[in-house]
Image: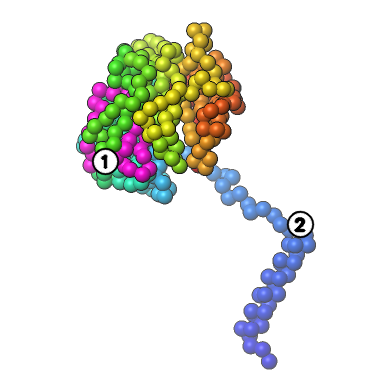
Amino acid sequence: MTSPDFRRTLLGLLLCLGFAAHAASDPGARQPVPDHYSGMQWREVGPYRGGRAAAITGVSGQPSLYYMGATGGGVWKTADAGLSWQNISDAYFGGSIGAIAVAPGDANVIYVGTGEGTLRGNLSQGDGVWRSVDAGRTWTHVGLRNSRTIPRLAVDPRDPDVVLAAVLGDVFAPSEDRGVYRTTDGGKHWKRVLFAGSQAGANEVIMDPSNPRIVYATTWRVQRGPHFLSSGGEGSGLWKSSDGGESWVALNGNEGLPKATAEKPLGIHTIAVSASQPDNLYAMVEHADGGLFRSRDAGKTWALINGDRALRQRAWYFSGVTADP
């Protein structure tokens, strides 16, 4: 005589075996898991304010934590994936924000570059770099006060005191403060390591996530006026450093990339490094024969993979490219 518990257990096993046998014998029974996300749509999660946002970053390992820099409203923080936002810069600074970078090795350390790089006619400029060591609760100004416009910052994943800043400079006039700058002491001292001319500032700097000694940067000759934008010319280009930013080589002469001529100047460039395969690069290039280019050998050779003009319209505004990690 078997117990009721044993009979229930045996029945459950037989049912499981029966379902498994049916699924194995009937291919039609093996249906894919329903797509529970098919009905979801993008929606605005704030903060509810006017205008554009030029800088935003998440924090690795904390999927609900983000920082957003407004073009005229300082730095905002959400810890609940956008359900609520808090301004964290008002007591210290505000205005136009061009770049935000959280130190990969210490999420408490945040750098903010002021002055947006999306060059609308109504842009306002900034006053350099600010640093927080307590996740945005307090801030300290750490230099580059005359930079005016900082579209990108890159922090060494091994050392939160090592930072590279792409300085576009005064977009309304020639400026000797343009270029890529490097600090090794958290912003106490900065050294300019790349300079392409008084009319060509740096708009992008990015480290190879697997080897921060490999750095890529872009420079852009640009001038903004009340009623015009002049984009492109001498000084615009794509650069690579193999020693953490101390020295640089130009990549625009490499196979596959468009060449600058008087009739076809180079304009804005942006670049992305694939974290899963760091020799795999993507670059958006403003040029008559430009578009989205790809390199599979860390920038030695390139191939145009999409020249659709839809990707290049208003290139000074929508030329960003990001690689899936």
Where residue 293 appears, x then y in whole percent?
A: 55, 26
**Residue 146 among magenta residues:** yes
Q: Residue furthest right?
A: 25
Q: Which mark is residue 27?
A: 2
Which residue is at 44% across, 12% downward?
233
The mark lying in front, picked from 1 and 2, is 1
Q: Is 307 placed above or below 108 here?
A: above
Q: Quadrant of the N terminus?
A: bottom right
Tell me which corner region of the image, top left, top right, bottom left or bottom right, holds residue 110: top left
Question: Dot 1 lies on which element?
Answer: strand
Label 1 belongs to which residue? 132
Badge 1: few (under 14), some or many (20 or more) residues near its Cα, within 10 Å?
A: some
> As shown in the figure, which amino acid type bears the numbered disc 1?
Ser
On screen, residue 156 versus residue 254, left or right, reads: left
Q: Residue furthest top?
A: 263
N-terminal of the pair, mark 1 or mark 2, is 2
> As shown in the figure, which amino acid type bears the numbered disc 2?
Pro
| Residue sitting nearer the eye, 279 or 13 | 279
Tell me which corner region of the image, top left, top right, bottom left or bottom right, holds residue 136: top left
| Residue sitting nearer the eye, 250 or 106 | 250
- Secondary structure mostly seen in the magenta stretch: loop
Which residue is at 29% across, 20% downward?
177
Where residue 82 appears, x then y in whole percent?
A: 40, 43
On screen, residue 210 versus residue 258, left or right, reads: left
The magenta stretch is 138-167
**Residue 291 among magenta residues:** no
Which residue is at 35% across, 30% downward?
246
Where residue 238 appears, x then y in whole percent?
A: 46, 23
| Residue sitting nearer the eye, 15 or 293 | 293
On screen, residue 115 versus residue 210, left or right, reads: left
Badge 2: few (under 14), some or many (20 or more) residues near its Cα, within 10 Å?
A: few
